[in-house]
Image (cartoon, rainbow, N blue to C red):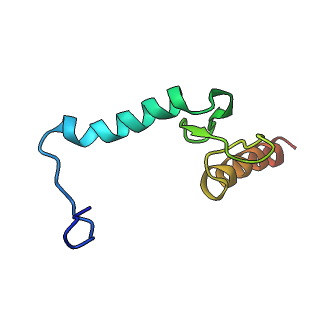
Amino acid sequence: MDPDSLGWRWIAPVTIHDALAPVLLDAADLVTAGQRERLRYCPSCDWLFEDQTRNGQRRWCDMADCGSRDKAKRYYRRSKSG
């Protein structure tokens, strides 16, 4: 953030390390500082996500994408075999 104009500005990364450093730092923070018992694996996209639901029973990283896709696959398998 630019303190003079109070606006955001983008500083383009010069190297691949500059581009990946924020991603790796966020990933390391999620694994080390977050609640590890809340880390989940999304079977649809193979990503890790932090389950922030009240009951801790979330199955997908995003219901609109991965949840719908996974449910459609299971429905297709059931209807095809039946």
Question: Which residue is at the front of the view, 79 or 70?
Answer: 70
| Residue 75, percent from left and from top | 78, 49
Tag count: 0
Question: Which residue is at the front of the view, 18 or 47?
Answer: 18
Residue drawn 53% across and 37% down?
47
Residue located farthest toward the left when viewing the structure as drawn: 14
Q: Quadrant of residue 3?
A: bottom left
Q: Is residue 69 above or below residue 2?
A: above
**The C terminus: image quadrant:** top right
Question: Which residue is at the front of the view, 74 or 58?
Answer: 58
**The N terminus: image quadrant:** bottom left
Question: Which residue is at the front of the view, 70 or 26?
Answer: 26
| Residue 42, percent from left and from top | 62, 38
Residue located farthest toward the bottom when viewing the structure as drawn: 5
Q: Is residue 10 above or below residue 35?
A: below
| Residue 24, percent from left and from top | 36, 34
Residue drawn 63% across and 36% down?
43
Residue located farthest toward the right when viewing the structure as drawn: 82
Residue drawn 17% across and 55% down?
11
In the picture, measured across the screen, residue 19 lies left or right of residue 31, that is left
| Residue 78, percent from left and from top | 82, 44
In the picture, measured across the screen, residue 19 lies left or right of residue 67, that is left
Residue drawn 27% across and 66% down?
8
